[in-house]
């Protein structure tokens, strides 16, 4: 009888752990990738409706980590940073192996709260999933920012992200951003060009490639990119007025 009870308990534990992993995988599939890729302006009404629906789901299933994670992502888009942090915290509390929740909580901290503490979340994500390219990409960005883009700090992580997922445009974008900040404009342009090859609607890369081209006196090419960024991304990406300002 004791053996049967032990087997039942073991089965429940395995099912719980698998549930955590499945939840994280589902979240990754439905993630809007707000970390690096912003192509268009958000539909705030749609996001508000999504939060209302998630509120109902959380009321019905208060221990479902994935719903808290999704609501955290939605609050992030609405710039409700404290609410997003609380949701990510709750998702992690309910599912301590929730890799994406650590990554997005770290990104929230990096962008708006505590840059130093963000690295701890990225470290945790990598310890749980050593092959997660997004975690390396985010940690590389954080390390570079913390060092004011001086030296090669963070570049190893960015190279690792590309090695793990060479078809993810965001990994090249991260590295290009760091190179641009380090004024390695030609190398940055090469990374942004690779992004655009992989994702022709990556407004951020058109914008940053356009600015980088202007820095190397390629005003014509730079303006073409700036116009494309505005066309894809809308008003928030429109820096075409710079075309009238000689470098």
Image (cartoon, helix red, strand yellow):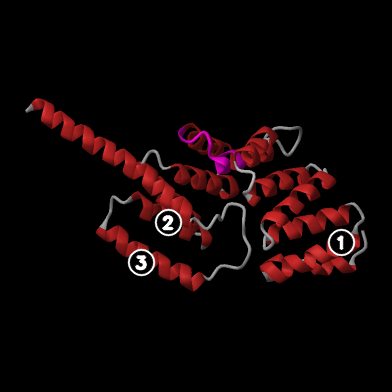
Kindly check if marks 1 and 2 are in contact, taking CB atoms under 8 A apart as contact: no
Q: Residue furthest left?
A: 1
Quarter assignment of residue 217: bottom right
The residue under label 1 is 221
Quarter assignment of residue 158: top right
Residue 24 image position (x, y, % from top left): 41, 47
The residue under label 3 is 53
Q: Secondary structure at mark 1?
A: helix
Q: Pick whichever, 138 or 22, lies toward us.
A: 22
Res 70 label: 2
Q: Residue furthest bottom?
A: 45
Q: Which image quarter is the C terminus in? A: bottom right
Q: How many C-alpha atoms fall within 10 Å of the one at disc 1: few (<14), some, or many (≥20)?
A: some
Q: Pick whichever, 210 or 147, lies toward us.
A: 210
The residues colored magenta run 128-137
User: Disc 3 or 2, which lies upstream in sequence?
Assistant: 3
């Amino acid at each position: 009888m004791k053996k049967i009870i032990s087997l039942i308990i073991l089965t429940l534990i395995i099912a719980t752990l698998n549930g955590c992993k499945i939840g994280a995988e589902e979240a990754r599939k439905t993630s809007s990738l707000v970390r690096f890729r912003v192509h268009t302006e958000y539909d705030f009404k749609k996001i508000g409706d999504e939060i209302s629906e998630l509120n109902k789901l959380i009321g019905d299933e208060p221990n479902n980590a994935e719903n808290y994670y999704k609501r955290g992502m939605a609050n992030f888009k609405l710039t409700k940073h404290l609410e997003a942090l609380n949701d990510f915290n709750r998702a992690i509390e309910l599912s301590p192996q929730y890799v994406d929740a650590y990554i997005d909580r770290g990104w929230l901290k990096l962008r708006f709260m505590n840059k130093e503490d963000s690295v701890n979340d990225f470290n945790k994500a990598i310890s749980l999933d050593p092959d997660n390219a997004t975690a390396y990409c985010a940690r590389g960005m954080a390390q570079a920012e913390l060092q004011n883009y001086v030296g090669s700090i963070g570049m190893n992580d960015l190279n690792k992200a590309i090695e793990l997922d060479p078809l993810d445009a965001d990994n090249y974008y991260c590295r290009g951003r760091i190179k641009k900040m380090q004024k390695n404009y030609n190398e940055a342009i090469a990374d942004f060009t690779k992004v655009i090859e992989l994702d022709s609607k990556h407004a951020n890369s058109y914008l940053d490639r356009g600015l980088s081209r202007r820095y190397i006196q390629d005003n014509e090419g730079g303006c073409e990119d700036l116009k494309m960024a505005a066309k894809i991304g809308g008003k928030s990406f429109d820096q075409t007025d710079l075309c009238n300002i000689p470098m």
